[in-house]
Amino acid sequence: MAEEIGLDLVEISPDAKPPVCKIMDFGKYKYEIAQKAREARQNQTHIVVKEIRFGLKIEPHDYETKKAHIERFLKGGDKVKVTVQFKGREQTRPEMGYRLLMKLSEEVTDFGFVEFAPKKEGKSMTMVLSPVLKKSQAAKKSAPKPVVAVSTEKSAPEIIAQ
């Protein structure tokens, strides 16, 4: 019967008594499933972990510049791994690195929060900051909105891209 119509006979539930079959275009069915899977992959967000390294004796201007980079990464929806490198005798003073990381975390609380607290590993101390907004929400916020120009003439509104 399926061959007369030019379709396929597909077994849906082989374990049922009697087995359940359906007449359908199997090629079209497989294509639709592949399209749905591709669309689902496009809507996925990939979380990226960016890394910023600090020295213990960082100058105020350098600190502000790196803090601005961290804020930009967090606004974009990415996680940030902040590392303080200890050199030479600085390794005996891990509390100074801890204070630097805690100062940084307090200054970026509007954009992110501490996911992993500062932890000393060898010659460095690391902390991970996570964004307040998810990556998909951050992308929606940063997308430019079109400006609609309103004229006195009777015509359709004109959309101007920025």
Image (tube, rainbow, N blue to C red):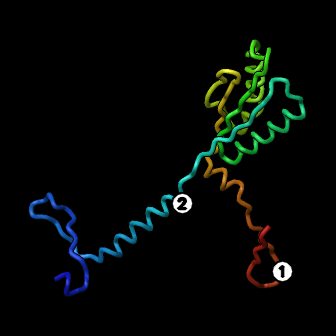
Number of marks in picture: 2
In the picture of the structure, the residue carrying the numbered disc 1 is 152
In depth, the one of 66 and 138 nearer the eye is 66
Above or below, 128 against 74 in this view is above
Above or below, 127 against 13 in this view is above
Residue drawn at 75 percent across, 74 percent down:
159
Residue drawn at 75 percent across, 41 percent down:
71
Across and down, in percent, residue 19 comes to: 13, 64
In depth, the one of 25 and 149 nearer the eye is 25
Q: Quadrant of residue 22?
A: bottom left
The reply, left or right, for residue 76 in relation to residue 5 is right
Q: Quadrant of residue 100?
A: top right
State the mark number for residue 26. none
**In which quadrant is the C terminus drawn?**
bottom right
The reply, left or right, for residue 33 in relation to residue 158 is left
Q: Disc 1 residue type?
A: Thr
Please name which of the two marks, 2 or 1, marks the residue nearer to the observer: 2
Q: Is residue 132 visible?
A: no
Circle nearer the N terminus (2, 1): 2
Q: Disc 2 residue type?
A: Gln
Residue drawn at 64 percent across, 41 percent down:
49
In depth, the one of 84 and 108 nearer the eye is 84
In depth, the one of 154 and 31 nearer the eye is 31
Task: Say what secondary structure mark 2 lies in.
Answer: helix
Q: Is residue 42 visible?
A: yes
Instruction: Tell me the CA gap for discs 2 and 1.
Output: 42 Å
Above or below, 36 against 80 in this view is below
In the picture of the structure, the residue carrying the numbered disc 2 is 42
Above or below, 137 against 50 in this view is below
Q: Residues within 10 Å of mark 1 (few under 14, many from 20)?
A: few
Q: Do residues under tags 2 and 1 come within 8 Å of each other at their CB atoms?
A: no
**In which quadrant is the N terminus drawn?**
bottom left
